[in-house]
Amino acid sequence: MKATIIVKPKKGVLDPQGNAIKKVAENYFGVIFGEIRSGKYFEVEIEHENAKNIIEQLASKILSNEIIEDYEIIYESRNS
Amino acid sequence: MKVGIVRFLGTNCDYDCEFAANYMGAQTKFVWHEQTNLKEFDCIILPGGFSYGDYLRAGALAKFTKLASALIEFDKYGGYILGICNGFQILCELHLLDGALITNVNLRFIHKQVHIKLIPSICKLTQNIEKKILQMPIAHKEGNFYCDETTLKKLNDENRIVFKYCDKDGNVDIGSNPNGSLENIAGICNKKGNVLGLMPHPERAVSFLGQDGEHFFNFLR
């Protein structure tokens, strides 16, 4: 099984990197952006009968810190 | 007092902490990250550094070591645990302390002398500090203390905020906040007062480096 895990700062948590990118982008394009939030991206491969459960725990217990981050898991369909 | 100084892969303030603790008269021993029994110690210090390269998040990977489980046991017995800089980040990741340390608001690694104010708290390690404004260095990129509003209220209500960044006269204001920390927080403790985490480096302010670290380490005497 393959999955993509995206970890991003929780709403309301300061994201200094996103803010810096926003400033540069606004200067470059001469337009005003709403928020730009930066996060992390992980690609995971695992063959196991409990794969989904393990990936869920990987995302919640290791890859993200629930105090400051949210995560999203996108499973890759088998026939792709 | 017998002090265990933890070494994770990437810890780099271990010798400084050993020097400071010995200087204060404590007996010290290094503790490898695979050690599972901490019963011989009265106090464990988690020194600063870049444990596991700070990969993923600062302090995140250290919590999966054998020693991390031993630390949780050690806390149950009420042993003193002091986390300095990366050690503070690890204690937060372990949930032995509340909140998290995120990237400094200016996105930079900051290395400079700061002043911190001792706040009246329940922390058992700081009860004998006579000087209320201490000067010592900070050296970090992820020292911006964050927690949600409920937790912040709890930290205040339960007197668990131990140090705040201030100016040389003790004024806690935006100008003296080096990294964007909520309410200028530089250090907090747990509910029992036996676990303390702070971003500044008291071990770099003892002997020929200064006296304020010696005030801080009074609990080791």
Image (cartoon, coloured by chain):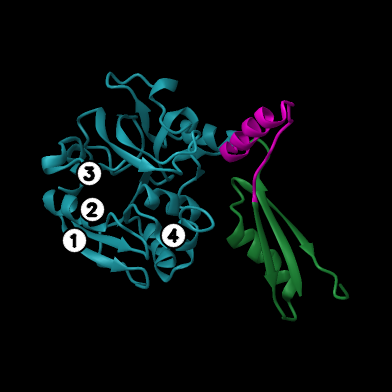
The mark that comes first in sequence, 2 or 1, is 2
User: CB under 8 Å between callouts 3 and 1?
Assistant: no
Q: What residue type is labelled 2?
A: Cys
> On the rendered structure, is B159 left or right of A1?
left
Q: Is mark 3 on a helix, strand or loop?
A: helix
Badge 1 density bin: few <14, some 14–19, many ≥20, Cα 10 Å: many
Q: Closest to the observer: B11 or A38?
A: A38
Which hue is chain B drawn in?
cyan
Badge 3 density bin: few <14, some 14–19, many ≥20, Cα 10 Å: many
Q: Closest to the observer: B109 or B15?
A: B109
The residue drawn where x is 19% and y is 37% is B215
Camera-near label (3 vs 2) is 3
Q: Do labels 3 and 1 share a chain?
A: yes
Residue indicated by mark 1: B28
The mark that comes first in sequence, 4 or 2, is 2
Which hue is chain A drawn in?
green
